[in-house]
């Protein structure tokens, strides 16, 4: 199932789309071989930016919310993918415990949790929600905007298992990115599957590590397609030990911004791109949209007090500096970017993040964002070969799905590299 194309673009992105369509058998075989060697994240969502001259992921979320934005037509794919994922992990599973974010106030997030419950219920699992919030001491009903209720229950920990009263799950699904650290109640579970694993949380995970893995993957994938990996990869750098409140690390940020802008300018010159390059500075260990800023010149770093704290007021000291990728997508005249959702190794759907208050060079995951469901075509559920590039929604979404799966593969490499239980060979 694939959406109608909302924004038709011309130029190099159509050439990339055609190359991907022409190489589909080789691409799918390449992914198939990769998944024989690597385990995909249990679920993921990838933010893409389509500049018209390049298409690149700018963020990969391993604890995705936003499931409520998937259309009803996407649900069968999500349910099938959920079945496949659970069968690989715990085929006899009867119960699924979902651990959400600790402090739930956003109605949209509650709706996302309810959608996750529907997906796994239809996949054959009893689903209940266990909260890490110490204020939840008894089963507590939380009202949703549409009048439905979501039940949050206090977690119960035994020596080796985690569950709820009268509920012993085989599998525990984290929908909490662990930005505040790893709670002890989740550690040392030897008889249950915890998905994603604890080292997928932001107490361990770093965007720079992810994009380093992605860079290596795009080099190999670029050879397969015969393209410059830059067309699907955002250049990046990183800075550590930064304390903007005390002026520490400004030199690193300034030097790296200058160097990165220079690399982008050379690429723009190579491809005849008449755009002003920019750099997006993000916390290296956060994904909720806070602490992100756009700069076109290192001189703009002088007034970046907003980079001092991230999600939950956590102090920020590590940053990734990422090549800014313009978005020329539009929904209703507003700037938009596609977000692709995956479960196991399968693309299950997506939507456009829209933000009328932001420009083409700005972060859209910010106040004022809305979401446009991707409409589906009854006739086109797979790539439509022979269609003119840029004219087919299925073809465009297939290209988006290919690049999103590359980011998902990078996440699997990343998790393998940080797995504390991985066997190390000399």
Image (cartoon, rainbow, N blue to C red):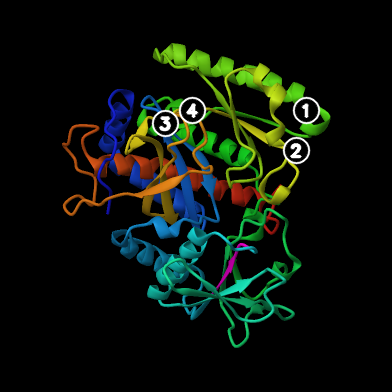
The residue pinned by badge 1 equals 249
Residue 304, visible in the rendered structure: yes
Mark 3 and mark 1: span between their CA atoms?
Answer: 30 Å
Q: Between tags 4 and 1, which lies in front?
A: 4
Which structural element holds mark 4? loop
Binning the other alpha carbons within 10 Å of mark 4 as few (below 14), some (14 to 19) or many (20 upward) gives many
Residue occupying image coordinates x 79% and y 34%: 241
Q: Quote the CA–CA distance across marks 4 and 3.
A: 7 Å
Task: State which tag comes first along the sequence, 4 or 3.
Answer: 3
User: Upstream in the sequence, badge 4 or badge 1?
Assistant: 1
Q: Are marks 3 and 1 in contact (CB under 8 Å)?
A: no
Determine which residue is flagged by label 2. 317
Coordinates of residue 76 in the picture (x, y in percent): 31, 65
- Region rendered in magenta: 97-101
Q: Main secondary structure of the magenta part?
A: strand
How packed mark 1 is, by other alpha carbons closer than 10 Å (few <14, some 14-19, many 20 or more), is some
Q: Position of residue 133 (x, y in %)?
A: 68, 68
- Residue at 34% from the left image edge and 35% from the top image edge: 330
Horizontal and vertical percent position of residue 18: 26, 32
Marked residue nearer the N-terminal end (1 or 2): 1
Q: Name the residue beneath numbered marker 3.
A: 327
Residue 361, label in figure: 4
- Helix or strand or loop: what does disc 3 sit on? loop
Tell which residue pokes out farthest to the right in this image.
Answer: 246
Q: Is residue 244 above or below residue 152?
A: above
Mark 3 and mark 1 lie on one chain; the one further toward the N terminus is 1
């Amino acid at each position: 199932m694939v959406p109608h194309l909302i924004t038709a673009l011309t130029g190099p992105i159509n050439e990339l789309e055609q190359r991907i369509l022409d190489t589909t058998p080789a691409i799918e075989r390449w992914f198939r071989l990769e998944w024989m060697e690597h385990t995909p994240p249990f679920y993921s969502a990838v933010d893409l930016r389509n500049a018209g001259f390049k298409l690149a992921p700018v963020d990969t979320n391993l604890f995705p919310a936003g499931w409520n934005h998937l259309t009803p037509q996407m649900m069968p794919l999500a349910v099938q993918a959920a079945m496949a994922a659970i069968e690989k992990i715990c085929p006899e599973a009867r119960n699924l415990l979902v651990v959400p974010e600790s402090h739930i106030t956003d109605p949209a997030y509650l709706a996302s949790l309810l959608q996750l419950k529907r997906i796994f219920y239809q996949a054959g699992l009893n689903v209940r929600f266990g909260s890490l919030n110490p204020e939840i001491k008894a089963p507590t009903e939380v009202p949703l905007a549409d009048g439905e209720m979501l039940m949050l229950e206090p977690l119960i920990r035994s020596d080796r298992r985690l569950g709820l009263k009268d509920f012993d799950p085989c599998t525990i699904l984290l929908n909490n990115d662990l930005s505040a650290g790893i709670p002890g109640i989740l550690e040392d579970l030897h008889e249950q599957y915890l998905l994603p694993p604890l080292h997928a949380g932001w107490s361990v995970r770093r965007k720079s590590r992810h994009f380093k893995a992605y860079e290596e993957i795009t080099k190999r994938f670029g050879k397969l397609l015969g393209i410059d990996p830059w067309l699907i990869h955002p250049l990046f750098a990183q800075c550590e030990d930064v304390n903007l409140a005390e002026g520490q690390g400004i030199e690193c940020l300034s030097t790296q911004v200058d160097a990165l802008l220079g690399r982008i300018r050379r690429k723009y010159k190579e491809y005849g791109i008449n755009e002003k390059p920019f750099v997006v500075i993000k916390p290296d260990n956060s994904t909720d949209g806070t602490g992100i800023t756009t700069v076109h010149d290192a001189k703009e770093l002088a007034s970046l007090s907003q980079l001092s704290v991230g999600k939950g007021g956590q102090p920020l000291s590590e940053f990734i500096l990422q090549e800014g990728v313009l978005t020329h997508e539009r929904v209703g005249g507003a700037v938009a970017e596609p977000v692709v959702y995956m479960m196991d190794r399968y693309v299950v759907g997506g939507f456009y993040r829209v933000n009328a208050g932001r420009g083409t060079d700005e972060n859209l995951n910010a106040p004022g964002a809305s979401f446009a469901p991707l409409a589906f075509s009854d006739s086109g559920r797979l790539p439509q070969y022979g269609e003119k590039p840029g004219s087919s929604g299925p073809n465009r979404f297939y290209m988006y799905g290919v690049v999103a799966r590359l980011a998902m593969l990078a996440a699997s490499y990343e998790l393998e590299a940080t797995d504390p239980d991985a066997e190390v060979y000399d």
